[in-house]
Amino acid sequence: MAGAGTVTAREIITSYDGPKLRIMEVCGTHTHEIFRLGIRKLLPEQIELISGPGCPVCVTQVGFIDEAVLLALDHHATVCTFGDLVRVPGTEMSLAGARAKGARVQVVYSPLDAVDYAAGHPEEQVVFLSVGFETTTPASCLAVEQAMERGLTNFSLLTANKTMPSAYQALKGSADVFLYPGHVNAITGTAVCEALTEQGVSGVVTGFTAAEILTALALAIKKSREGKPFFVNAYPRVVTREGSVEARTLMDRLLEPCDTEWRGLGVIPGSGVRLREAYAAYDARKKFALPEIRGRGNPACRCGDVLQGKCRPCDCKVFGTGCTPEHPVGACMVSNEGACSAYYQYGGDNNA
């Protein structure tokens, strides 16, 4: 309860009458929570919330889906994956389409489940589709270590893991303020975001409750008035400056940086990770000698523009007509963290 004379976060937001302020909610979970909680309805017209590239399924390149389909159909591997990826369209088909043709596609809830599946099915080659950011990547590393400890030779990863700092740099100028995803910063710490202020990038890291999001938006408004780049950790109960040293040590031990493609952003140097040579036996691309595949997305889909904050999902001509959750044209409509999915579910336009 605010004391006498105290201005609440909600009051700071609703009373804003300054210049136009574009705030990018980088994380797809923030996008969905902001809609679900009705926070967009509080915003004055000068504040625009735009979606960013923080949905791991959404930024995964089309070619990765094509590789997974190739493994399933041509190499007869069992593909283990999170459920969201099954319906993401590839160039010719999705994994759901491959499964309809007889491919083995298993939905799992953790990469460790895929290791257990491989142990129980030694006659099958099992490939886990490893996607995500710093939050989920450590679990894939643990899966490789566990497979090694159990002596499994029929388990490997197809990696499309990405790191967020390079994406922030690539999107510099797309928004006035980034709403940083708290769960990512719980791993990376805050030093990276603090350093980004020296490049003119402002941001607030926050959690996912109504109070946390409102506080972050109010802080973004207040700090923006000062006219200089800033960073605020508004999620101190989870995020520390050093982050999770153990998780980063694990990733550094097994993985090395590489260039990787982001849907909509193109190839960002050094923004991906791949298994080090010492773990090549668990790298599906090397194990199956996969050719380089350049996927082709549906030209009607504007997921790439949505992920860069260049348009709203409802600006896409196929949104809600040719592209729905039941019949998705692009990844942003498939994923539970996708901006298009959020706009469709909650009937959103710019400030709905």
Image (cartoon, rainbow, N blue to C red):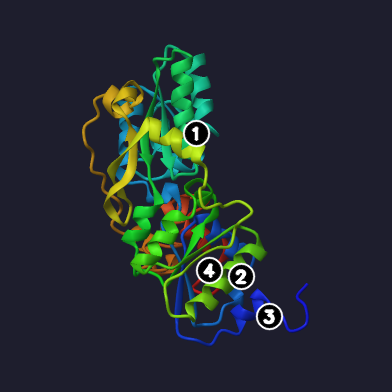
For badge 4, the amino acid type reads Gly
Cβ atoms under marks 2 and 4 closer than 8 Å = no
Q: Residues within 10 Å of mark 1 (few under 14, many from 20)?
A: some
Q: Earlier in the sequence, mark 4 or mark 1?
A: 1
Tell me, for residue 348, which label it has, or none: 4
Under circle 4, the secondary element is: loop
Q: Is residue 73 left or right of residue 348?
A: left
Under circle 3, the secondary element is: loop
Q: Residues within 10 Å of mark 3 (few under 14, many from 20)?
A: few
Q: Which residue is mark 2?
A: 39
From mark 4 to mark 1, how far is it between C-alphas?
A: 34 Å
Mark 3 vs mark 4, foreground winner is 3
Q: Which residue is mark 1?
A: 139
Q: Is residue 349 left or right of residue 286?
A: right
For badge 2, the amino acid type reads Ile
Q: Which residue is mark 3?
A: 7
For badge 1, the amino acid type reads Ala
Mark 2 vs mark 4, foreground winner is 2
Q: Is residue 52 left or right of residue 273?
A: right
Q: Position of residue 57 (x, y in %)?
A: 43, 47
Q: Residue at x 64, y 54 (%)?
A: 237
Cβ atoms under marks 1 and 3 closer than 8 Å = no
From mark 2 to mark 1, how far is it between C-alphas?
A: 33 Å
Mark 3 vs mark 2, foreground winner is 3
Q: Position of residue 153 (x, y in %)?
A: 39, 15
Q: Name the residue nearer the viewer: 104 or 241.
A: 241
Q: Is residue 352 left or right of residue 22?
A: right
Mark 4 vs mark 1, foreground winner is 1
